[in-house]
Image: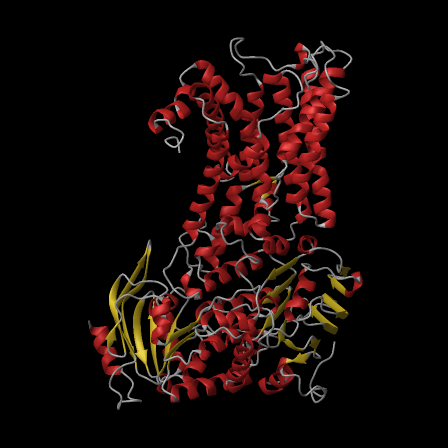
Amino acid sequence: MFALLGHNPADTLFAFFITPLMTINGISEWLLKASPLILIGCGLAIGFRANVWNIGAEGQLVIGAVCASGVGLFYPAPESALLLPLMVIAGMAGGMVWAAIPAFLRARMNTNEILVTLMMTYIATLLLSLLVHGPWRDPDGYNYPQTALLPDAAMFELFDPMYRLNTSILITVVAVFAMWFFTERSFFGYKMSVGGAAPLAARYAGFKQSGSIWMGLLISGGLAGIAGMAEAAGPLGQLSAQISPGYGFAAIIVAFIGRLHAVGIVLGGLLLSLLYLGGEAVQLSLGLPSALTSIFQGMLLFFLLASDFLIFYRFTPSPKPTKGGVT
Amino acid sequence: MPSFREIQEELPNVLETNMTPRLELRHICKRYPGVIANDDVSLSIMPGEIHAVLGENGAGKSTLMKIIYGAIRADEGEMVFDGNPIASHGPSVSRALGIEMVYQHFALFESVSVVENIALSVSGTFDLAALANRVRDVSKKYGLPIDPHRFVYNLSVGERQRVEIVRCLMQKPKLLILDEPTSVLTPQAVIKLFETLRQLAAEGCSILYISHKLDEVQVLCDSATVLRNGLITGTAKPKQSTPIELARMMVGADLPETHLDPSTTSDTPFLNVNHLTAPSDNPFGISLNDVLLSVFGGEVVGIAGVSGNGQAELISFLSGEVLFKGADTITLGGKDVGQLDAGYRREQGLAFVPEERLGRGAVPPHHLSDNAMLTGHRLGMVKNWMIQRGKANDFAAQIIRKFNVKTTGYESAANSLSGGNLQKFIVGREIELGPKVLIISQPTWGVDVGAAAFIRQALIDLSRTGAAVLIISEELDELFEVCDRLYVICQGQLSKSLDRKNTNVEEVGLLMTGLNNNSNSDNSKAF
């Protein structure tokens, strides 16, 4: 693939995967980008385990960022130490409300949550666009579609002023442990996994499906909202039209690469984050197109699904479609 | 190899004229991690012979049959079919040779119709209409009534088995393997099936017949091979042996007998169904019509009937998996529960064993400890929303020990257990819950004789501690062995209550076919 674009594949792969991690700044960026992916991935995995397919984490992330920035921009006491916690709550609540709509529709009217969450994503991005182009646009911002900078008290503390990595990563760490605990130890997590693996068995045991739907969507929505808030209150410092480079969608891949387990999701998030970084790096150093990142993401998910399929099924050279051909 | 020589000597003399065996197995071995499924198994079947393979769950019968069919490969040994060794084996090779098999777990696609399922295994031009006619002909000829255009997901287990048998018969097989074929048939249908099988055998088709029912084997089979723990423990001519001899070879010990002690029943019914009428919500389901049913504490009540006559619908209403509009139609311990879900009914002391083990009674990929928790979580396994893993493990281990579930431990996945073993586990789990009312569907389907006797005794014992036990079964012998009272269900209608002591297999058999609606009024005890 790189050869087609006129570059030595070995060198390019080195530039893609290794070079970004050779500086402290690189590692800081790596963790910074992995953090939202892991955070959202944890939430999504909880839903996916129960066959609740939240595809709209991107929209929940956007709404979370919008709500949190709203609090950050308009809170009457911009120096208050309460501001940041309030923003976390606002971000989470925003994401949850956004996810509650498909949850309600699914639980009550049995609509397909895949479609609804996806459509809600477009509404969310358009809403964001409306705000940053209109009422919330920074009057001193030279007409860029972005808000004013958030006050200092609304920003996560940096570990080191040289680098962008901030304390929001601690939220992710806590979320990973909480997710592990929820899926492996809590009774509700167990009920959800029964509903995902065998819906009839869940009905047989008297576990309500609607509980899983609400829980799956609210948790994933809330975590996506926090991720959006952490973007606004972290590296960006303001709300802009391009709040996320597709974290909400990439997190779906993270959840699947991580096999819906906490440890796997951490590794998956680190891998995808590296793809983002590498993509940027080769763009800068070698002038390769940014679509490479998307191609890598796509290939990753595709190979993952293919290997799943090939583990459970095998090709047989049988000329006629007999039932015995597939075992 | 003494066992091999024994078999050669014991070879049936039914068809001495034809000297080439239809199928010969030589020293078949199959090992799985931790268990030897088949150890040096040799047997041979003549054309037109009906050969029984007997053994408990986990004895290696199913493995052996799958090796013959080519679904799995033996580690050692060889197979000779009509005098030609089979070198590379597989299901398609088997079909080309004329080997057909009806699995214990069926291999049907649920979302398409019967005839489309059969079309998958029939070579030649694709003509559904013509095929449907052939299906009808075959099913009529062999007494296996089935509508070719029905969708499989609507069919009961019994009906699905008919489809499987018909599908095999369409191929005009030379060797037909049947795994527990009669467990879902009425006594009349069993007789009819045996006629079919004898007719097939007379046409030269060899039949391998796996069953736990010794009386059937004695009536039908020319010869028998008995397996225990993967080894051949004996061969016999069933018609000249006693059931006790055969059972001893299978179990390795004498069978326990079931004791049905007299008991006193509670004053009010624990489970009561009052004029339940429920039209079916899909075109092929069965509508329930004015069902009257009561089960008192301290008794075992059975519902007999061929599957697909409304049992599945009735059970879903009783278990709470499907809610019923009229709340007071179903009462549990005097409470109206028609509109309360399965979880609530379990809080009220209901336990239930469904017919489908994988996916309903147990979560297939979860390990046994998790599956013990599926309904056992009420026994203090959840504290502050957290799972008490130790207690769940103990509970699972207790079930495995008490009900002699053959498994490597509570960490094995439910879908790694054989059907009978999983059934023992699920039945054990529900009994260990100490329910006030236990509803159990097909309690011993696919379970070996030793374990079946144990389960039956456990059900009786449970009722004698004061619980109400309702058994839905197609096995009349079983119902007559354990039940105090019987109902018969046919076409969504439940008969009057019959006292076991005042009825007999013939009367129940007739009721199962929908005849004889009135003549039982004398000896029935109406509640």
**Farthest-out residue, bottom:** B17
x 59%, y 35%: residue: A43
Judge from the rendering whether residue B17 lies leftward or rightward of residue A325; answer left or right.
left
Give the colour scheme of this rendering.
Answer: secondary structure
Q: Residue at x 66, y 33 (%)?
A: A59
Residue nearest the observer in this picture, A175 or B255 = A175
User: Which residue is farthest left?
Assistant: B1
Q: Which quadrant is the N terminus of chain B positioned in?
A: bottom left
Image coordinates of residue B472 in percent, x first then y, are 61, 71
Q: Is residue A266 visible?
A: no
Position above or below: A198 against B128: above
Q: Quadrant of residue B435?
A: bottom right
Viewer-side residue, A108 vs B478:
A108
Q: Is residue A311 above or below residue B474?
A: above
User: Is B152 on the left or on the right of A295, as rendered?
Assistant: right
Placement of the C terminus of chain B among the 4 image quadrants: bottom right
Give percent across and percent down for residue A282.
44, 23
